Image: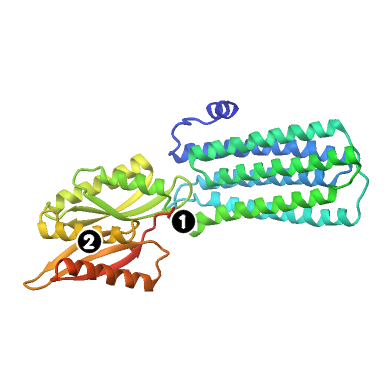
Amino acid sequence: MMTNLLVRLFVKDYEQTENAQVRTRYGLMSSVVGICCNVVLFAAKLLTGIMLNSISVMADAFNNLSDAASSVIGFAGVKMAEKPADADHPFGHGRMEYIAAFVVAFLVIQVGFSLFKTSVGKILHPEELAFSLVSVFILLLTVAVKLWMSFFNRKLGKRINSQVMLATAADSLGDVWATSATILSIVVFGVFHVNIDGIVGLIVSVLVMIAGFNIAKDTLAPLLGEAVPPEVYDRITQFVEQFDGIVGSHDLIVHNYGPGRSMASIHAEVPADVNIEVSHEIIDRIEKEAYEQMGVFLVVHMDPVEMNNPLVTKLKELATQIIQAEDERLTLHDFRIVEGKARINVLFDLVVPREYNKERQEELKQKVCQKIKEQDSRCYCIILTESSFKQEV
């Protein structure tokens, strides 16, 4: 309820989540909320840590301070990411959001490592703790705030498909566990008079570093280039294939230039007997509407396919049955034949999973060719193998 209220109050046109400017507003709101909450949590935990003389509580406080700094960097990253395209960056500056998140990851790891060294010192040279129910209550409130922040960022991240927000949500959930462990050390000391503060501080520091590594991993993936997520792959292919005059599609590639900023290319199959100008007009319309409706700069390559040759249809159905019997994940495209008096050359591209090495691909091609030839001795296959850019699940 609180999340929806904040969205309605501070995000103009919040329902238009595909709009780059709306996504920027979501990012700015998330950053401001993160800065405010983490600064308050830092102050509350630092005061509590000083009262209790607890390294684990103070370690947790500085973890929140690093989270506030992360939100500041995230704020700057979102603002830089909204800069329009220019001569040097024709696809815009959207990846600045990922770069900012990567810087945040290193800050989190650095804080975690510093806390790790301090905690080791506390284990080797433990100091007396103090116990206070008020302090425990304050820490429980901070757990509640961090739990809400995790749900807040996860909800927004899913709404606008932001990996940065989802990573922030995971980091907040890690803070929940870290603070809970700190509360445990204080309660254990209050009840049993056993000081496990240094050990818990060590656990907290490791959790902080793990959160930093996870953020770095999630941020590096789009920078290095990811496979196309199945839902994105299906959305674009279904969009293209809905147009009259398009009979199929393949070879979809999507390049990410920041959240909500994508360039893609796809091969669209058109009937070979349709006037090329007619098909070209359809392709132009697809590219225009893809940008208008999905915000994707789509380049469409036109592939003519034979639709009215019974022999082509028969052999394509045969080849499809054969490869599906071998592996349901196999698909083919660009199917064509060159028909002679005594010989038929059957040519097509075979899409295989990436786990297929060269030896397995050659073995598969020979097997498929042999089975097609068994059905029609005139057939000689020429098969090219390739892997899809779609994310395998």
Secondary element type, mark 2: helix
**Which residue shows up at 83% across the image and 56% down it?**
120
Q: Where is residue 321 in the image (x, y as percent from the top left)?
A: 24, 58
Q: 149 or 14, which is in the foreground?
A: 149
Nearer to me, 286 or 161: 161
Tell me which numbered mark, 1 or 2, is placed earlier along the sequence.
Answer: 1
The total number of labels drawn is 2
Q: Name the residue under label 1.
A: 226
Residue 319, numbered label: 2
Q: Where is residue 56 in the image (x, y as percent from the top left)?
A: 81, 46
**Horizontal side of residue 128 vs 232, given as left or right:** right
Q: Which mark identifies residue 207?
A: none
When the figure is inspected, residue 341 is found, relative to residue 151, above or below; the finding is below
Mark 1, secondary structure of its residue: loop
**Disc 2 residue type?**
Ala
* Residue 344: % across, % down: 13, 69
Name the residue rendered at 46%, 30% in the picture.
Answer: 13
Question: In which quarter of the view is residue 253 placed?
Answer: bottom left
